[in-house]
Image (cartoon, rainbow, N blue to C red):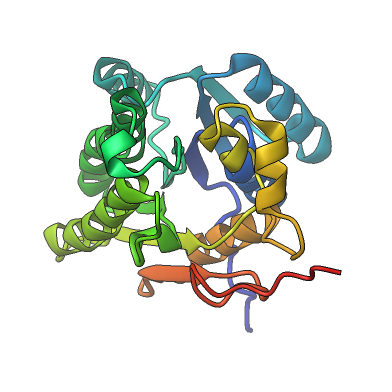
Amino acid sequence: MSHAPQDPLRGALVLITGASAGIGAATARAFAAAGSRLLLAARRRPRIEELAAELRDAHGTEVHLRTLDVRDPAAVRGWCEELEAEELVPDILVNNAGLSRGLDPIHQGKIEDWEEMIDTNVKGMLYMSRAILPLMVARGRGHVIHLGSIAGDTVYPGGNVYNATKFAVKALTEAMNLDLVGTPIRISSVDPGLVETEFSEVRFHGDVERARKVYEGYTPLSPDDVAEVIRYVAAAPPHVNLFRTVVYPTDQRNPYVMHRDTR
């Protein structure tokens, strides 16, 4: 008698950082719809409480919340120790928390912007991975998915430090895979092109009009588009690692080449 293969995401425990908005919130919805249990972390507690209520109502999802700034290594370590004690070690870690600040040339850049990007995009990802990976290795299963970017492949004018952080994510995705050879732990990244989220609004320090112009004249990716790719990467069979998955909107062919409808 043949049996349908078990859905690998049903009942899986998924930890998502930066879950309060954008790709993080969309990823939570995608995993909830797949029957996963969730550990949601973000700085904005009211946002993740609202999301948790939505997912419980829609899917009956088991959701655990944590107010967390991934830039704080002690807070990250403390939470992960609690998760181990409570037997809530995630099967999947989605290192989504990240941001960009400014488009200033390097000689005019704001050091506080650089520090925020490096501390969140690189060090925060490292703190989470360092805390969770030993637990996955000890248990003999686990999957870490980084949110990368096409900015980690090609530098663009004004991108400088943001580009550097995403080049670091790319390098660390490769390095972690090498370090974990011989274990069943997979390290993947999903690297999108232009996605319409709060990203540009954050980059321009709340300038909504400037952010809106970034997305004029073409159809960008949506957070749901990227979340579906993350879900697909996570659902691959254990012997398959979708190492880097690059995702562009059809109107964009590389960081510089885009079709904009100017009519």
User: Is 2 situated above or below 200?
Assistant: below
Q: Please report the residue visible at 58 percent of the width from the left and 64 percent of the height from the top.
A: 229
Q: Which residue sits at x=34%, y=52%?
A: 163
Q: In terms of image quadrants, where is residue 121?
A: top left
Depth order, front residue of 219/76 = 219
Question: Does any portion of residue 25 appear in the rendered image?
Answer: no
Q: Position of residue 5 (x, y in %)?
A: 59, 72
Residue 57: image quadrant is top right
Q: Name the spot of residue 240 as percent of width and height, x first.
A: 38, 74
Which quadrant is the C terminus positioned in?
Answer: bottom right
Outermost residue on the right side: it is 263
Q: Position of residue 136 (x, y in %)?
A: 28, 45
Q: Position of residue 255 (x, y in %)?
A: 49, 67
Q: Residue at x 34, y 28 (%)?
A: 110
The number of callouts visible is 0
Quadrant of the snapshot with the N terminus: bottom right
Residue at the farthest bottom position: 1
Is residue 71 among what the camera can see?
yes
Decide: is 100 above or below 80.
below
Q: Which of these two is toward me, 223 or 212? A: 212
Q: Is residue 213 left or right of residue 99?
A: right
